[in-house]
Image (spheres, rainbow, N blue to C red):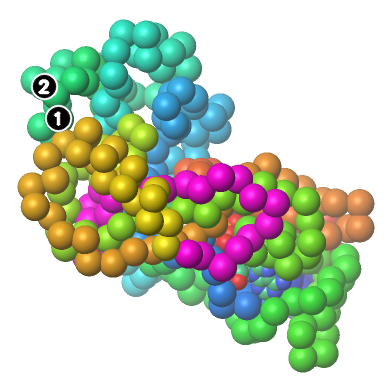
Amino acid sequence: MPVNAPHVLVIGAGVAGASVAYFASRLGARVTVVDAGRHAASTVPSALVNPVRGQSGAVDERAVEGLRLTWALVDGLAEAGCPVPHGRVGVLRPVPDGRARQKFERHLPPELPHAWLAPEEVPVPLAPGWEHALWLPEGGWLDGAAFTAGLLAASGAEVVLGRAVGWDARSVTLEDGQVVCGAAVVRCGGSVGASWASEAATHRAGTLLTLDRAVTDVPVSFGAYLAPAAVGGVLGATFEAPAASWREPTLPLRSLGWLLGRAEALTDLGGARVVGRWGGTRLSGLVTGRTPDGVWRLCGLGSKGFLLGPLLARHVAGDVVRAAPG
Ligand SMILES: Cc1cc2nc3c(=O)[nH]c(=O)nc-3n(C[C@H](O)[C@H](O)[C@H](O)COP(=O)(O)OP(=O)(O)OC[C@H]3O[C@@H](n4cnc5c(N)ncnc54)[C@H](O)[C@@H]3O)c2cc1C
């Protein structure tokens, strides 16, 4: 490490913070990550890397670049000895009717490889009623916790376990009174971090069911999603009403009934058994860049943490390292 390498402090070791740490260290920075070790949405057991979002089919203008970077990182982590369970197997988006298809088509950029399939051509037998299916060959799924931990390990960052209760442009104060000083501070605290900092934001708690086996070999998504996971498969996700702050996760029984109904509308579940659940909270309203107090931010990744998180982190890390005194 160069003698005058800037020392970058990152609060939060979810996919946002781990990605900032990874790219900052590749740019020559010395990095310390402070993490409370609690409530990271990034431990999602199977995250879709899906460029075509929701039931409107919206495509972020950075989606193609983001998805290719995420897969390049998965490859790089494997080479560095941090394999990430994943399936770069495509994503299937069943679409109920011609009107919905038109809506999707309006959003599809020419540079995003895709194909429209008739129900009899799809790689997964769909339940009756779907008129069209959009095939996204570059999509897939990955293990959120392994990807995030791999980036953090590959960054070589020093990790300090603890909750940050104060920060300014050059320092972070921990709950136990310890002060860590550096050349720049980047806050990547996700939903729980925004809540601990009493910031106004929109939080949505979500629950996935983990299954004893993958119902489909490729992720299938419309309303709900079925996807393989490192162990078994997942059925995701319920999303509860937006809330003004993070809350301790509960078991949303009513929403789980809805989720199972949505899954059966996608395909035959073939007797797959529910073996567990995973809950997390996503934060909407992307904030990226330097705030007036001199602290950098990357948070509010919404449902695109693994599609756009690393790409946005690469931009933030570049700006931070360029601006930080060595
Ligand atoms: C049910 C569900 C399903 C999802 N599915 C997908 C999907 O299929 N594809 C996809 O791309 N995305 C998906 N997401 C979204 C994705 O999980 C999030 O966008 C992403 O994980 C957010 O990452 P983050 O690093 O911003 O926050 P987090 O992962 O929440 O990490 C924040 C970290 O910061 C720490 N922290 C916060 N404040 C402090 C502090 N003051 N001091 C110390 N540490 C602190 C926390 O303890 C935590 O470890 C899903 C989310 C949910 C809830």
Image position, residue 210 (x, y; %)? 27, 60
Is 215 covered by the magenta stretch? no
Residue on which the image places disc 1: 127
Residue on which the image places disc 2: 121
Amino acid type, mark 2: Glu
Secondary structure category for the residue under label 1: loop
Count of labels shown? Answer: 2
Of pointers 1 and 2, the one earlier in the residue sequence: 2
Is there CB contact under 8 Å for labels 1 and 2?
Answer: no
Residue shown at 43%/56% (left/top)? 252
Amino acid type, mark 1: Ala
Image position, residue 153 (x, y; %)? 48, 74
Q: Is residue 305 above or below residue 181?
A: above
Q: Is residue 276 above or below residue 201?
A: below
Disc 2 under 8 Å from ligand 1? The reply is no
Q: Where ligand 1 lies, by quadrant?
A: bottom right
Residue shown at 77%/91% (left/top)? 176
Which residue of the protein is positioned furthest toward the front in this rendering? 254
Image position, residue 135 (x, y; %)? 26, 26
Answer whether residue 312 is visible to the viewer in this image: no
How far is the residue under mark 1 from the one under mark 2?
13 Å
Secondary structure category for the residue under label 2: helix
